[in-house]
Image (cartoon, grey):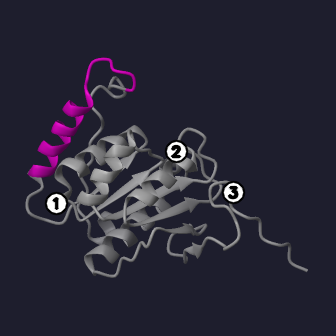
Amino acid sequence: MVARGFRVATFDLLGQGASDKPALFISQDDQVAALALLIDQLGDVPIFLGGISFGGLIALRYAIDRGDRLAGLALMSSFAELSPQLLLLGNALRTGLILNGEFDFLTPRSLHETLRLGIPDSALVIIPRAFHAFTLEKPALTADLLCRFAEDVLARKWKGDRAVWIAPEKAGEALIPFPRGHDHLRAIPAHAAPP
């Protein structure tokens, strides 16, 4: 992403998993507050916030509280905590990219569907042959998809339209619209074998 002109700041959840999933030592409110402090240090620039797995929940909570501070939200292998939050999120943030590994059994696509329907100008992109950790399995493709999203939002070309797409195999290749007549919550349809 840096090679494409983006400044990148990263934030690991406090306690590295000792958060309230279940409630242990560090609350979600504390996680969101720490994230807000980091984002405030970035200055008055467009902010694209990404969250992976439980970090996506913290990103959603930040977006609900401070959606006016974000240019876009990218959720990867994530979920929504409560459906009332989605109403607030839809009111606060209208632009989102939702990424899901085809075989992600930890955050199944039904959880991503709730996000896709709750964020008005969002799109769901399914990463083929990938699991929950697709950011590690396919880092170049993930970075490319995130950059495309941010570039389109900044250029005012992003049109999520709650669409569902299939990611390409390699970074830079075209996204494929999810074929009509197939259930995107189940599987990516197999292509017919060449004659």
Question: Dot 2, how many residues are within 10 Å of its Cα: few (below 14), some (14-19), or many (20+)?
Answer: some
Q: Is residue 161 magenta?
A: no
From the viewer's side, name the closer residue of 5 and 163: 163
| Front disc: 2 or 3 | 3
Residue displayed at 70% across by 71% down: 181
Q: Is residue 28 left or right of residue 149?
A: left
Q: Is residue 155 left or right of residue 121?
A: left
Image mark for residue 133: 2
Q: Which residues are magenta?
A: 21-40
Considering the whole magenta stretch, tell me its main secondary structure.
helix
Of label 3 and label 1, which has the lower sequence position?
Answer: 1
| Front disc: 1 or 2 | 1
Q: Quadrant of residue 185?
A: bottom right
* Amino acid type, residue under disc 2 in the picture: Ala
Image mark for residue 187: 3
Of label 1 and label 2, which has the lower sequence position?
Answer: 1
Q: CA distance from mark 2 to mark 3?
A: 18 Å
Q: CA distance from mark 1 to mark 2?
A: 29 Å
Q: Quadrant of residue 68?
A: bottom left
Residue displayed at 58% across by 69% down: 168
Image mark for residue 68: 1
Q: Quadrant of residue 121?
A: bottom left
Question: Dot 1, how many residues are within 10 Å of its Cα: few (below 14), some (14-19), or many (20+)?
Answer: few
Q: Is residue 81 left or right of residue 112?
A: left
Do labels 1 and 2 touch, CB within 8 Å?
A: no
Image mark for residue 46: none
Q: CA distance from mark 3 to mark 1?
A: 35 Å
* Amino acid type, residue under disc 3 in the picture: Ala
Judged from the image, the secondary structure of the residue bearing numbered disc 2 is loop
